[in-house]
Amino acid sequence: MKKVRDRVVLVILSSLWYSEDSWLRLFARFLLTFLVLAQIYSIRMASELKSSIGYLVYHYNGTHSQASGNSTMDVLQRKLQCCGAQNYTDWLKETAASWRLPAEKAYVPESCCKEEYFHCTGDLGHLEQFFQEGCLKNVLELLAGVSNGILMTRETFYNLRFLEVFFQKY
């Protein structure tokens, strides 16, 4: 789907770019600049999120309480139904360092556990009991959904009414 969208954008940009109307060419350059800056920002944002979630995993305090709000990482994992930054194996790297526990007893936090498994302790011998997908992907998808929702509202583009002039000619 993304490849199709990218091709459509390229076709539209190229048709505007080589248009005989100078306003359309100017608009195409503006649009291209906007798309490049948006791509740079999204890459930077993903990198910052990866770093922030990795920081949360590393500095996790190791408490195993079902109380909501115990730590940011617990809330994030419960609400988004995920485990770790990239996936549950992030906890294998961090267990000894951040939880100050013996490395031979590796496990994931209870906040990674699926709700239907009441007695889940995060034991790696029972992978089916906890979420294995990482939180970074879920956070990025959530933010993409929110930004798409904002862009789809009519009020957002209300001040760009002057662009109608470009499209009335065609």
Image (cartoon, helix red, strand yellow):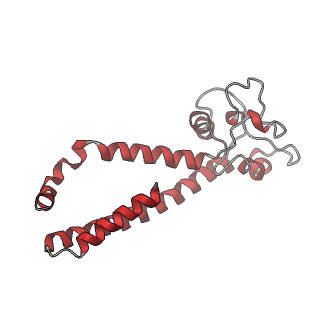
Q: Nearer the viewer, residue 149 or 3?
A: 3
Q: Nearer the viewer, residue 131 or 78?
A: 131
Q: Position of residue 124 (x, y in %)?
A: 81, 40
At 37% from the left and 46% from the top, the residue drawn is 148
Q: Nearer the viewer, residue 150 or 152?
A: 152
At 64% from the left and 47% from the top, the residue drawn is 134
Farthest residue toward the right? 104
Q: Nearer the viewer, residue 55 or 150?
A: 150
The quarter holding residue 169 reads: bottom left
Where 80 sits versus 86, above or below? above
Q: Position of residue 157 (x, y in %)?
A: 22, 49
Q: Is residue 160 left or right of residue 117?
A: left
At 66% from the left and 42% from the top, the residue drawn is 83
Answer whether residue 42 is visible to the viewer in this image.
Answer: no
Q: Is residue 71 left or right of residue 168?
A: right
Q: Position of residue 86 (x, y in %)?
A: 65, 52
The quarter holding residue 118 reads: top right
Q: Position of residue 136 (x, y in %)?
A: 58, 49
Where 13 sits versus 98, above or below? below
Q: Quadrant of the C terminus?
A: bottom left
Q: Is residue 54 left or right of residue 148?
A: right
The quarter holding residue 38 reads: bottom left
Where 151 sits versus 42, above or below? above
At 76% from the left and 35% from the top, the residue drawn is 128
